[in-house]
Image (tube, rainbow, N blue to C red):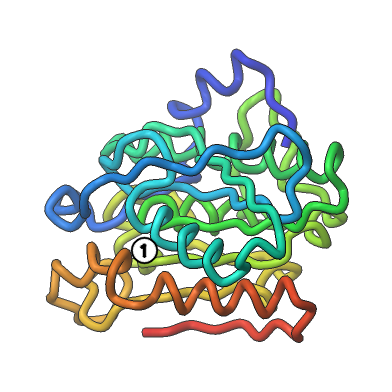
Amino acid sequence: MTLTTAAKASQAKRVRYGVAAAGVSVAALLGPQATPVAAADTCPDVEVVFARGTFEAPGVGATGQAFVDALTARLNGKDTVGVYPVSYPASLDFAQAADGIADASTKIEAIAASCPSTKIVLGGYSQGAAVAGYTTTETLPAGFVLPSGISGPMPPAIASHVAAVVLFGTPANWVVDLADHDAPPIAIGALYAPKTLELCAPGDPVCSPGGLDRAAHSAYKDNGMAGQAADYVVNALGGAPAQPQQNV
């Protein structure tokens, strides 16, 4: 997507495109923050573009950091890893998740243009998983109006630069509707679905049908799923056939 500064500043009021997790109870579900890894100045072998969850401090958040640490450990210096924390408010003003969609897509397109050999990994946790999921969208709902300055979804050619997509605690459709009645369901684009891993901890009320365990939503940083996502990405980076997965 191509943005003007004015469009980016105003799009939160005009677009119901990004969604948070868990309605007003999301604050109780999130874990502590972590300091993000800085991206390299030169083109890295791998670039992680990650969106944090609601109320987490700017950066990649605790789940994002756990995933980055696990991935870096598994690559063991074989590949250089850059990290880009998606910039957006991550607040209960759910419409402002559109800022994250715009920022993530702009960054991905910039990497593809300036570092074509870099393999991009797109990820997100909770509201950030909604941001990342919407970023892969290839078609817009009927009647959906984009703010001026945004041309539409990322060009199809960009998909070849994205090696994998990893989503933690992606909001279920009913959560999306609760957060914003005008927001469409999160639909992974067809070019990205074969290389997307969606992880949902058992009992997580944000993503698991009938889930009642609030603690499960904040457990991704230490429940082993960050490592599971890292394994998935390592396989994708190594050229193994990607298999779409959903762990609920």
Q: Residues within 10 Å of mark 1 (few under 14, many from 20)?
A: many
* Left or right of 150, for residue 248: left
Q: Measured from the top left, where is residue 15 in percent x and y? A: 50, 36
Front-most of residues 242 and 19: 242
Quarter of the picture holding the C terminus:
bottom left
Residue at x 61%, y 82% (from the top left corner): 244
Q: Residue at 60%, 67% (x, y): give it.
A: 76
Residue 193 visible in rendering: yes
Residue drawn at (58%, 48%) of the image: 49
Q: Label 1 sits on what residue type?
A: Pro
In this view, which residue lies farthest toward the front? Answer: 77
Per the image, the residue denoted by label 1 is: 171
The residue depicted at 47 percent of the width and 47 percent of the height is 51
Q: Nearer the viewer, residue 74 or 121?
A: 74
Say which element carries label 1. loop
Residue 103 location (% of width, % of height): 59, 35
The N terminus sits in image quarter: top right
Residue 147 position, x and y percent, is 61, 28
Question: Toward the viewer: 197 or 71?
Answer: 71
On the picture, is 103 further left or further right than 176?
right
Give residue 132's quadrant in the image: bottom right
Q: Above or below — where is 153 with respect to 78?
A: above
At which x and y percent is residue 127? Answer: 37, 51
Q: How many marks?
A: 1
Q: Is residue 182 among the parts visible in the rendering?
A: no
| Residue projecting furthest to the top | 6
Placement of 140 over or under 99, stated as above or below? below
